[in-house]
Amino acid sequence: MDILPEDATSSRKLILHEFWVLFKGSIPVVLAYTLQNSLQTVSILIVGQASPKDLSTAAFSYMFAMCSAWLIGMGGSTALDTLASSTFTSGGNKHDVGILLQRGFIVLTLFYIPVAIIWVASEPLFRALGQSEQLSRDSAKFLTCLIPGGLGYIYFETMKKYLQAQEIMRPGTYILLITSPISAALNYLFVYTAGWGIFAAPFATGIGYWLSFLGLVLYAKFVAGAECWGGWSRKSVQNTGIFAKLAALGFLHVGTEWCVYCSAE
């Protein structure tokens, strides 16, 4: 059966329209991830001005953080991509999306606890991996100072997925455009102006992550995203096993992707 010219034109317009919608929606997501990673990148650059030793400590510590806690945040929160998005579009009770957000906070916090313990006791682990005594000791201290900020990172990522499930894509970019410069300024003030040294940098970066999370909370409350929040509910502690399985599969999936990139390099 031949396709009429009018049908072909209509199909091309539909394809172009869908492409433009996806492209426009992906831009704030890409910018958000770029700005999100800039907090630790800028921290490394600022700390690295002091000495090559401090540069190696900060770079190694943030790399280990990305392969552990950041992986929980970026991979584990993909469970909300699956559950919250389908719940929001199903036409059911919108407050179930808020319950899923609460469940995400609970489950990912539980996943983070063993990571935090590993960070505190990471010095012998780094030595076993062949790192120098100085780098192992300083990186373990650096990561210990980063523990509060790591939870802020995970909560920010979870809150961002909650908003994205409601087709609200831009807030993460807006908030990070504000908090990224604040984090950079705090890194410089803590490390150099106040003279607290390299181990103040993870506290400064952690403040940036917590400010980013609180910014999203305020955005959801006062601008857009509050319709799916029905208050704290006991239902959030139910069916945590299903959420935990999806979260585990998520950070395993993201982790294997990163391993492929590293092996390719």
Image (cartoon, rainbow, N blue to C red):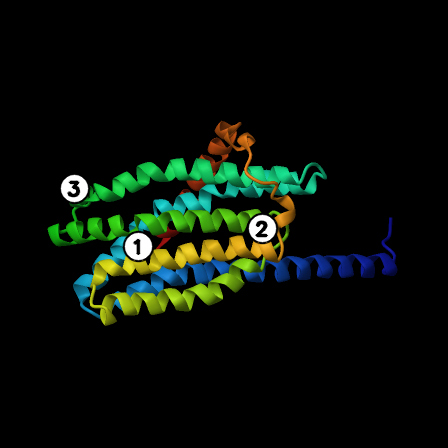
Q: Position of residue 121 (x, y in %)?
A: 21, 41
Vertical placement of residue 113 versus 188, above or below: above
Residue under label 1 = 62
Q: Secondary structure at mark 2?
A: helix
Kind of element beneath mark 3: helix
Q: Which residue position holds label 2?
A: 163
Distance Cα–Cα, label 1 vs label 2: 27 Å
Residue 124's tag is 3
| Cα gap from disc 3 to disc 2, whole angstroms | 40 Å
Does residue 217 appear to the left or right of 140 in the view shown? Answer: right
Hey, what amino acid is under mark 3? Pro
- Tag 2 or tag 3, which sits nearer the N-term? 3
**Rendered position, 87 above or below 240:** below
Q: Residues within 10 Å of mark 3 (few under 14, many from 20)?
A: some
Amino acid type shown at disc 1 = Tyr
Q: Residue at x 34, y 38 (%)?
A: 113
> Quick one: 265 or 231, which is closer to the camera?
231
Q: Who is closer to the viewer here, 16 or 61? A: 61
Label 2: how many Cα within 10 Å (few below 14, some 14–19, many 20+): many
Judge whether residue 66 can be spotted in this image. no
Q: In the rendered image, is residue 169 in sight?
A: yes
Q: Is residue 66 left or right of residue 29?
A: left
- The image's mark for residue 263 is none
How far across and how far down the image is residue 112, in percent?
36, 40
Amino acid identity at mark 2: Leu
